[in-house]
Image (cartoon, grey):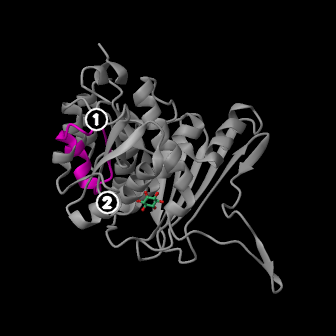
Amino acid sequence: MTTSIAESAARRPVFTSGAGLLGVGVIGAGVMGGFHARLFGAGIGGARLAAVSDPDRGRAAAVAAGAAVFEDGLALIRDDAVDAVLVAAPDAAHHGLVIEALRLGKPVLCEKPLAATLPECREIVAAEGGRGLVSTGFMRRFDPAYREMKAALAAGQVGVPLLLNCAHRNQAAPGWFTGPMIVTNAMVHEIDIARWLLGAEYVEARIAEVGAQGDMVLAELVTDLGAVVRIEVFMNAAYGYHVQTELVGRAGSVTMAEPALTRLRSAGAARAAYPSDWIGRFAESYRAQDQAWVDGIRSGQPDAALASARDGLRATDYCLQLVEMLAAGGCGTLTPAA
Ligand code: ISE
């Protein structure tokens, strides 16, 4: 028997922590956790920031805006003022934190990747048991540009999809980035968004590193509907953070416009600025995703665009298959995780 978010929540004294607002605890106060904490601090409708945790207490306090501060994420999860948990700890810590939240029946939004290994992802899906308590933070699903592409496809404006061309460039790889993370932490976004846009699974792939530094990877994946997804991830693109996607169909194509809001024409040249990181590009998507997550918990009707635990499992599984493929020479078949 499955249990909806609303049913699970009803078994706990939920929303009693503060004026009928959902008390959200944010685990991790690094780039992502700090950003989510600020979003909740600034106001996500129906929610309040109840707590922030980080092993560096000062870092948590800096974004807690008066909410409780913990050094230990597990202690935050167990706090009665915390009704729902946003996990933005390092990738390797996701599994233990999500499992504890599930043990207590608390809804979780876990930053991608859902977990670092396939057995861990599977354990999360099993522990959730169809209760709809876990969402995976694939915020691009809330980006207006990707949504317009999906709408254009659904309206038949581009015809049968043939090719999705994706570029994903970071200005500079973060210090904590290690080898396979270019696939499991960065390319995982394209793996998810292409599945979501095309409503397809992958069946075959080729993948290769470009250059000797391991900071650029190219992949070409064939879907079960026959379209090709071509992905470039470049971690040290120097000029800025840049995500570009084009969907080519039999009847037309839809391309993401450059994200800059303005174009400066001056001194014989035109100039549009690029943000330095993904928050600059996707700030509104994170806000919309966090709002949709809260609305889903409060109403018991999860937003259909939110990535589920199973979506998180699928994306990580494909990425781990791609990492193996890369090590083994570069091409082969892909199977969707059960
Ligand atoms: C980072 O971890 C993210 O999640 C960003 O969205 C992505 O663009 C970047 O490549 C990753 O390193």
**Farthest-out residue, front:** 19
x then y, percent, for residue 57: 21, 63
Is residue 110 visible from the viewing direction of this image? yes
**As drawn, is 100 to the left or to the right of 34?**
left
* Residue found at x 33% / y 66%: 179
- The residue under the point 53% across, 71% down is 276
Report whether 147 appears left or right of 251: left
Tag 1's secondary structure?
loop
Q: Is residue 221 visible?
A: no
Q: Earlier in the sequence, mark 1 or mark 2?
A: 1
User: In the figure, residue 266 lies in which quadrant?
Assistant: bottom right
Question: Where is mark 2, residue-wise?
Answer: 29
**Residue 156 higher or lower than 66, as above or below:** above
Q: Residue at x 61, y 70 (%)?
A: 274
> Looking at the image, which residue sits at the far top?
1
Q: Residues within 10 Å of mark 2 (few under 14, many from 20)?
A: many
Q: Can you give x and y, in whole percent of width and height, for residue 290 in the image?
A: 45, 43
Residue 330 locus on image (x, y percent):
43, 58
* Separation of marks 1 and 2 at Cα, in angstroms: 22 Å
Residue identified by numbered label 1: 17
Does the magenta segment cover residue 286? no
